Amino acid sequence: MQAAWLLVMMLWGSAGLLPSQTIFEQATSGGSQLSQTLDLGGYLRSTLYVGRAADPEDAQIKSGYGEFSLKLKADKQGFGRAFADFRVRDGREFGERVSQLNLREAYVEAYAGRFDFRIGHQIVVWGRADGMNPTDNITPKDILARSPDEDDRRLGNFLLRAYFNAHPLRVEGIWVPMYRASRIPVDFFNFPAGVFFEGRDLPPARISHSSWALKLNLELPSLDGSLSYFDGHNPSPGLFAERTALVNKPDQGLRFSLKSYRMRVWGMDFSTTVGGWGLRGEAAFRNPHEEPQPYGHIINPDLQYVLGIDREFAGEVSIILQYMGRWVLDFEELELPLNPWDMPWFKLGQKNRLLASQQYEISHALTLRAGKSFQHETLDAELMAYVNLTSHEFFLKPKITYALTDALSLVLGGEWYQGPEETLFDLIDPYLSAFFGEVRLSF
């Protein structure tokens, strides 16, 4: 940790030697002038999450930390640019000490005529739906991230990204040479006696295990849309166990691990405006390379689709309302086993379906994001809501942001997960439902 702080202070000290946050250099070569800029920014924040404890009359500190972020942007006009985001965090999360240096992103981009090339540690966001994107399968996520900022759930990975620009068309290609898994709530699952979690069984860094994707974008004044294809490992692994791990001996039990699998995803999305209303849609068909098993970690083929509307009123009120659906192909109900030795497999299959949102053949959900500005845009109120009409789960996240000054802000809010017994939101509710507060100084 001392080395991490030393690195941050060296970067900060180097910034202090600069005459300003932006450097302009003019050079003449072949009669043209080139401009180079270097921008430094970031923030300091203190964040606290408080939720319920085992004692209903008490409250528990779910998370409390201080974080420093330093962002560097370098731009060589006409040639390329570079970006890096360093974060240092120290505190406690889920009852454990957290002290880490996180390189969130660090990449270099080069321009060559109609081609752009970007290589390095990156976060890729695909899809035009709000929040939940069926086509967004490139880089992993951390659904356990403790932050009022939703974007902090996204994780980076090393990849090569290339563009070919032929307006109004833009072709994008991505190669992901190494796998990085999403963080999923396995530690919060309750398994029966004799079932043990052994860690991760993830693909090694080999060319044969790399992933790739293509995307064709259409960018018109009245319509944006894309067609996409992904072939590679699902960033969200499943729970895997060998059938021979259980041989009717209670002392051996069932041992499982997180394991990924390859899949193909065909996707599309669009956004346009109709009579002052925004209209957006997105759909993706996922098909695994291998044959799914009833209790296995590999998902069934499924079709996900999102259709939403949005509008802004008087520049102060904004609303985004979306319908989300999922159709699971080759769906079969999990049947309660007659042999008690098969019960661990049944439980494992239930958890895999929770993680993949494939408990039902057809499911429906609604999402809402509403926001309003007050006091000349110094006070912003926002509400996020998700309701699964099929499983009867719901999630609420109200948040208020007050700008004390241009650089100093105060955030207050909460996250509430609820669902029937043995649903995903019911299992994570005791750990993730909480009130939060944050003070942030940006520079």
Image: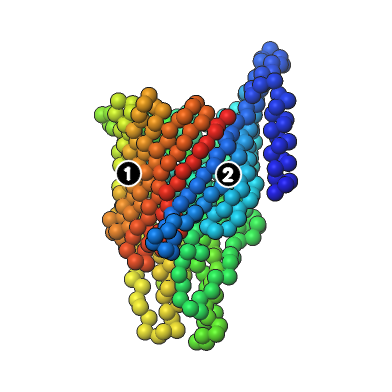
- Where is mark 1, residue-wise? 368
Question: Where is residue 188 drawn, in percent x and y?
Answer: 47, 64
Q: Residue furthest top?
A: 31
Front residue of this view, candidates 36 and 111: 36
Q: How many marks?
A: 2
Q: Residue at x 55, y 83 (%)?
A: 252
The spot of residue 245 in percent (x, y) is 54, 79
Q: Identify the residue at horizontal 34%, vertical 76% (top origin).
A: 335
Seen in the image, is 14 located left or right of residue 267? right
Of the residues shown, which amino acid type is indicated by label 2? Answer: Gly
Which residue is farthest bottom? 249
Q: Is residue 316 above or below residue 107?
A: above
Query: Is residue 409 shown above or below 290?
Result: above
- Which residue shows up at 61% across the image and 46% down it? 89
Residue 136 seen:
yes
Other residues around mark 1 within 10 Å, as few (<14) / some (14–19) / many (≥20): some
User: Earlier along the polypeptide chain: callout 1 or callout 2?
Assistant: 2
Type of amino acid under label 1:
Leu
Q: In terms of secondary structure, where does tag 2 sit?
A: strand
The Cα–Cα distance between marks 1 and 2, rounded to whole angstroms, is 31 Å
Q: Is residue 227 visible?
A: no
Tell me, for residue 66, which label it has, or none.
2
**Could you tell whether 288 is left or right of 20 in the image?**
left
Whole-percent x and y of residue 333?
33, 71
